[in-house]
C-alpha cells in the first residue's frame, strides 16, 4: 500500500478546506495556540481571499543546504492600536494585549491609525550568529510584507526611526557632557579619564563589529541576494545597550565626589551590563559568557603601570580584587533570578538596572538608611525566596485548580475536619507527592488544563477495568497496550448495548481513548504541578491553602523579627535595639512618653534624645529658621511625628478622592491622583528631614513588595482583597507579567533620586542619631517627586485631551503632552529652589542667580521631556527621574 494522501487522512476533506473550517470555529481559544500561530504566515497567505495576481508569494526562505527556515511571525496590521511600554502612555490600558487590538478612536489626541508599533520594546536583536534559521530582512521580504497587507517599512518611516534612535543616543551624550563638566566631577574625570575612554572604546568596538559578524555569518550559512543583506529592524531598541551602562557610570561619577571607591565596581558592572549578543560565544549552551567575564575584569588590569590607577584609589572599598572579579557572575545570576520571579513584567534594560542597583546597595551601602534597605531587600528577599519559594509555588498551583476538578466524596464518607487536617499534613503524604506522579485516571487529561506540559509527555492510566456483565469481544483496532475491557469501557457500552445506537453492531470499530477529543485531537495533559492536588477534596484543598498561608505569614514575621532586626541592630543602629530605637526616634520629645520611659527605667532599651529645651542659640548658629524651629522649639523627634501625621492625612484625603472618582472617571485620571499625593507628601516636607523620608520610602517599598508577593501567591485571606483593591488602577503594563509594577515603580521613581542625593552628601549626628542628619540640601533630592508626580501626570492628562500633534517618529506621545511635562517640571524645580532659599537651608554650592536657575531648570526639564518622548525600552517612571536627577545634580538649580 502506498502512503495515504491528505484527503484520506482528513476524511475526504482537503487540507486547505480543513484549515478554513477550523478558522470558522466559534471557540478558537486564542490563548491555547502556540506562539507562532497568532497569526501565522500560512493563515495570511492561505486563509485570505486570493488576489488578482493568482499566485501567492512563498512564505519561507531556503537555506544553502536546501532546508526551509521557520516561518517568521507576521507583523501586526496597521489597523491595530500600537502599544507602548512608556509610563505616561495613557492609551496603554488594553486588558487583553495578546489579542489584536481594536481600531483606535481618533479623539483626545490618541494615535493615528497608520502609525507604526512603537512599544514593542525589545533588547538588541537576537544574535543571528546563534539562531541560524532566522531569516534576514531583505528587500524581497519587505515587498512580500507589503503584498500581504502588512506594514511597509517605507524609507520615510525608517528615517523617522533612525532619527528617534539618534535622538536617544544624543541625550546620553549630552548628559555625559553635563556630568563631566560639573566643577566637582571634572577633577575626578580628568584623573581617571583613561579608564572611561577605554570602556567607551570597548563598547564602541563591540557594537561596530557586531554587524560584521552578522555579515560573515550570512555569507557562510546562506546565499544572500544582495551584497549587503543587513537592515536594522523596525522594532530595534537600543535601550539595553545605552541606559544600563550609561546611567551606571554617570550616577557613579556624581556620587564619587564623596566616595571615589564607587567607580571601580560600577565600571565593571557597566561592562557586565552590555548585551551578551555583542560578545562571541565560546559555549552556546552556557548562561555565562566567558569573553564578557574576561572583558569585565579589564579595569583591574589596564593602566596598572600608571601612577593613577583606579584600583589603587579604591582602597576603602570593602572588597578585594578576588571578590571584585565575581561581580559579573553575581550580576548574571541576579538577572536570572529576577527574570524567573518577574518573568515578562520587566524589560531587559529594567532588569539590568535593577540588578546593578541591588549589587551597589549590597557592596557600597554604608549609611544607616541604605543598611536598612539592604536588610529588607537582601536579607528579607533572599529569606522569603529560600524558605517560602516552594510553598508559594504550591499555593499558585492549587489556586489554578477549579472547584469542580477536586475529588468528591459520598455524603456518608465525609471524615471529621481534624482527621482531614492530619491527613493533609502527613509527612508520608507530602513525601509521596514530591517524589513523583502516581498512576491516574482519565480526569488528568483534559483540554482545560494548562499549556506548560509537553504534548508528548507520559500518559498515566489506572489499571484496566474488568467487565463482569455482557459479552466480551475483541477489538482489533484498539490502541496498543490497551486491554479489551478498557476498550469496551471506552466504547460507552453497558452490557453490550451501545448508548448512542439502538441496534448493536457486531464489528463496530472502537472509538479512540478518552484522552482524545471527539474530533480526534489529543487532549492536553494536566500540568504536573497541579496533578497532586486533584486527589484532594474541596474541603481538604481549602485547609491546605490556609496551612500554606499560615506558613508564609509566619516565615515573613520571623524573618523580620529575627533576621532583619538583628542585622539592622548591628550595622545600622550601632547596637541599639531597633524597636526601642524607633520608639525614641519618633516619640522621644513627647513629655508624657519621656516620663513613662524614665519611670519604668527603660532608658537602656528606648533611646531618648536630648531635651530640645536645652538647645541654646549657640548650637544653631548658621542654621536657617526651619532648622532652628525643628531643633530648638519642636524637637527633631516631634518634627518627625508631625511629618508622619501630615503624610497620613494626605494619604487619607487622596484615598477619599480616589474612591469618589472610582465610578465616574477613567482609569488614567484615578491613577494620577496617586501621583499628586506623592507631590503633596514629599515636595514641601522632604527638605525638613530627608533621612527620615528616605527611611520611610524604604519601609514602604518593602511593604509594597510583601503585599504584591501575597497577592501573587493567591493565598487567603489577603490575596483577594489586595487584588480587588488594585484592579481598578492597573493598566496594560501590569498585565504583561505576574507583578503589578505601577505602584512599585511610582515609589521607586520618587525614592531613587533621594537615595542617590543622600549618597553624595556628608552625614552628621550624635549618639543614637549618628548618621541621621545632613548639613546640606539640594534641589536634586526632589527630582523624582517632581518628575513622576508633576511631569508625568501633566503629560498624561494634557496629552490625552489636547494632544493632536505627534512627534516626528510617531507613537503615542504628543508635542502638547511633552510641553506640559517640561512646563510642570520647570514649575516644580522653581518651587524647590525657592523653598530652599526661603527655608534658608545650607547648600554645598553657592546659590545661583534667578536667571541662571531658570535657564538650568528649563534645560533639565526639556531633556527629561524629550527622554520621556523617545523612551521605549524601559519604564519612564524609573529611567526619566534618574535622568532628571543626573541633569539637576550636574547643572545645579
Image: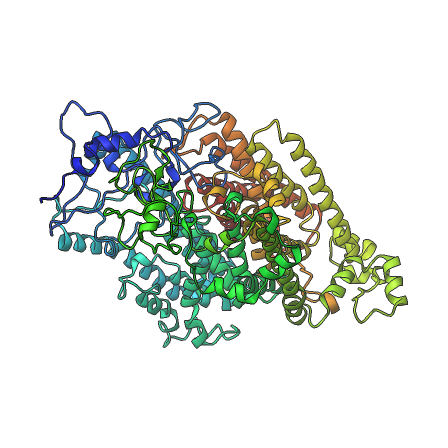
Q: In the rendered image, is residue 515 in sight?
A: no
Left or right for 157, reference 559 = left
Give the number of callouts: 0
Residue at the outermost left position: 1
Counting from the top left corner in percent of width and height, residue 101 is at 40, 31
Counting from the top left corner in percent of width and height, residue 852 is at 55, 44
Q: Which of 476 and 775 lies nearest the eye of the viewer? A: 476
Placement of the N terminus among the 4 image quadrants: top left
Protein image colouring:
rainbow
Which residue is at 67% across, 50% downward? 686
Counting from the top left corner in percent of width and height, residue 321 is at 44, 76
Q: In the rendered image, is residue 238 in sight?
A: yes
Q: Which of 110 and 549 lies nearest the eye of the viewer? A: 549
Q: Which of 778 and 296 lies nearest the eye of the viewer? A: 296
Q: On screen, 198 above or below 490? A: below
Q: On screen, 464 above or below 145? A: below
Q: On screen, 836 above or below 371? A: above
Which residue is at 63% across, 48% downward? 718
Q: On screen, 552 above or below 511? A: below
Counting from the top left corner in percent of width and height, residue 753 is at 56, 52
Amino acid at each position: 500500500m502506498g502512503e495515504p494522501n491528505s484527503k484520506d487522512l482528513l476524511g475526504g476533506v482537503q487540507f486547505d478546506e480543513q484549515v478554513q473550517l477550523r478558522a470558522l470555529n466559534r471557540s478558537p481559544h486564542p490563548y491555547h495556540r502556540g506562539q507562532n500561530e497568532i497569526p501565522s504566515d500560512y493563515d495570511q497567505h492561505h486563509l485570505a481571499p486570493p488576489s488578482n495576481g493568482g499566485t501567492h508569494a512563498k512564505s519561507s526562505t531556503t537555506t544553502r543546504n536546501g532546508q526551509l527556515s521557520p516561518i517568521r511571525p507576521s507583523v501586526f496590521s496597521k489597523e491595530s492600536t500600537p502599544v507602548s511600554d512608556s509610563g505616561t502612555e495613557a492609551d496603554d490600558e488594553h486588558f487583553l494585549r495578546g489579542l489584536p487590538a481594536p481600531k483606535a478612536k481618533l479623539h483626545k489626541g490618541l494615535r493615528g491609525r497608520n502609525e507604526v508599533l512603537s512599544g514593542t520594546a525589545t533588547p538588541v536583536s537576537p544574535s543571528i550568529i546563534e539562531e541560524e534559521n532566522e531569516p534576514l530582512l531583505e528587500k524581497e521580504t519587505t515587498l512580500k510584507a507589503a503584498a500581504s497587507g502588512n506594514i511597509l517599512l517605507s524609507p520615510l518611516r525608517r528615517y523617522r526611526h533612525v532619527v528617534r534612535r539618534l535622538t536617544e543616543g544624543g541625550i546620553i551624550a549630552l548628559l555625559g557632557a553635563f556630568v563631566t563638566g560639573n566643577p566637582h566631577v571634572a577633577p575626578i574625570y580628568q584623573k581617571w579619564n583613561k579608564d572611561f575612554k577605554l570602556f567607551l572604546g570597548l563598547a564602541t568596538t563591540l557594537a561596530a563589529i557586531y554587524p560584521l559578524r552578522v555579515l560573515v555569518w550570512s555569507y557562510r550559512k546562506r546565499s544572500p541576494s544582495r551584497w549587503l543583506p543587513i537592515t536594522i529592524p523596525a522594532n530595534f531598541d537600543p535601550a539595553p545597550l545605552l541606559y544600563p551602562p550609561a546611567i551606571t557610570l554617570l550616577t557613579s561619577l556624581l556620587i564619587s565626589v564623596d566616595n571615589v571607591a564607587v567607580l571601580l565596581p560600577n565600571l565593571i558592572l557597566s561592562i557586565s551590563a552590555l548585551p551578551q549578543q555583542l560578545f562571541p560565544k565560546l559555549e552556546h549552551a552556557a548562561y555565562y559568557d566567558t569573553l564578557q567575564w574576561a572583558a569585565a575584569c579589564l579595569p583591574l588590569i589596564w593602566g596598572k603601570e600608571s601612577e593613577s590607577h583606579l584600583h589603587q584609589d579604591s582602597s576603602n572599598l570593602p572588597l578585594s580584587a578576588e571578590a571584585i572579579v565575581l561581580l559579573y557572575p553575581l550580576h548574571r545570576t541576579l538577572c536570572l533570578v529576577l527574570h524567573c520571579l518577574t518573568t515578562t513584567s520587566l524589560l531587559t534594560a529594567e532588569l539590568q538596572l535593577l540588578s546593578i542597583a541591588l549589587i551597589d546597595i549590597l557592596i557600597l551601602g554604608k549609611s544607616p538608611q541604605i543598611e536598612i534597605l539592604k536588610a529588607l531587600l537582601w536579607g528579607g528577599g533572599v529569606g522569603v525566596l529560600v524558605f517560602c519559594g516552594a510553598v508559594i509555588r504550591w499555593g499558585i498551583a492549587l489556586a489554578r485548580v477549579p472547584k469542580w476538578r477536586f475529588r468528591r466524596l459520598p455524603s456518608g464518607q465525609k471524615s471529621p475536619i481534624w482527621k482531614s487536617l492530619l491527613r493533609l499534613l502527613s509527612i508520608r503524604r507530602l513525601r509521596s507527592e514530591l517524589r513523583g506522579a502516581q498512576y491516574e485516571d482519565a480526569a488528568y487529561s483534559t483540554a482545560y488544563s494548562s499549556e506548560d506540559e509537553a504534548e508528548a509527555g507520559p500518559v498515566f492510566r489506572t489499571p484496566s477495568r474488568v467487565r463482569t456483565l455482557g459479552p466480551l469481544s475483541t477489538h482489533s483496532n484498539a490502541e496498543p497496550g490497551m486491554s479489551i475491557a478498557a476498550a469496551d469501557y471506552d466504547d460507552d457500552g453497558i452490557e453490550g448495548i451501545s448508548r448512542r445506537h439502538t441496534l448493536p453492531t457486531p464489528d463496530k470499530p472502537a472509538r479512540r481513548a478518552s484522552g482524545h477529543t471527539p474530533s480526534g485531537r489529543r487532549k492536553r495533559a494536566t500540568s504536573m504541578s497541579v496533578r497532586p492536588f486533584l486527589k484532594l477534596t474541596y474541603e481538604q484543598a481549602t485547609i491546605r491553602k490556609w496551612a500554606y498561608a499560615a506558613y508564609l505569614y509566619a516565615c515573613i514575621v520571623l524573618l523580620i523579627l529575627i533576621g532583619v532586626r538583628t542585622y539592622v541592630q548591628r550595622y545600622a543602629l550601632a547596637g541599639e535595639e531597633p524597636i526601642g530605637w524607633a520608639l525614641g526616634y519618633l516619640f522621644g520629645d513627647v513629655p508624657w512618653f519621656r516620663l513613662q520611659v524614665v519611670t519604668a527605667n527603660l532608658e537602656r532599651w528606648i533611646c531618648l534624645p536630648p531635651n530640645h529645651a536645652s538647645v541654646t542659640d549657640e548650637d544653631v548658629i548658621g542654621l536657617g529658621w526651619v532648622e532652628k524651629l525643628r531643633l530648638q522649639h519642636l524637637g527633631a523627634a516631634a518634627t518627625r511625628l508631625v511629618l508622619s501625621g501630615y503624610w497620613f492625612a494626605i494619604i487619607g484625603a487622596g484615598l477619599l478622592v480616589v474612591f469618589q472618582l472610582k465610578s465616574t472617571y477613567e482609569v488614567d485620571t484615578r491613577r494620577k491622583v496617586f501621583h499628586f499625593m506623592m507631590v503633596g507628601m514629599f515636595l514641601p516636607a522632604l527638605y525638613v528631614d530627608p533621612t527620615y523620608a528616605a527611611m520611610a520610602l524604604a519601609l514602604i517599598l518593602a511593604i509594597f513588595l510583601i503585599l504584591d508577593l501575597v497577592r501573587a501567591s493567591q493565598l487567603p485571606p489577603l490575596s483577594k482583597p489586595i487584588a480587588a483593591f488594585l484592579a481598578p488602577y492597573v493598566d496594560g503594563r501590569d498585565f504583561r507579567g505576574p507583578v503589578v509594577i505601577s505602584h512599585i515603580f511610582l515609589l521607586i521613581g520618587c525614592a531613587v533620586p533621594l537615595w542617590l542625593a543622600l549618597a553624595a552628601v556628608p552625614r552628621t549626628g550624635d549618639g543614637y542619631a549618628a548618621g541621621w542628619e545632613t548639613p546640606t540640601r539640594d534641589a536634586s533630592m526632589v527630582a523624582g517627586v517632581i518628575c513622576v508626580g508633576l511631569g508625568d501626570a501633566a503629560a498624561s492628562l494634557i496629552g490625552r485631551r489636547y494632544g493632536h500633534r505627534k512627534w516626528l517618529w510617531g507613537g503615542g506621545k504628543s508635542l502638547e503632552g511633552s510641553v506640559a511635562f517640561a512646563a510642570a517640571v520647570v514649575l516644580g524645580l522653581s518651587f524647590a529652589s525657592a523653598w530652599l532659599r526661603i527655608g534658608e537651608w545650607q547648600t554645598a554650592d553657592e546659590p545661583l542667580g534667578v536667571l541662571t536657575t531658570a535657564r538650568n531648570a528649563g534645560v533639565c526639564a526639556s531633556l527629561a521631556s524629550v527622554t520621556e518622548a523617545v523612551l521605549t525600552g524601559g519604564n519612564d517612571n524609573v529611567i526619566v527621574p534618574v535622568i532628571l536627577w543626573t541633569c539637576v545634580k550636574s547643572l545645579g538649580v
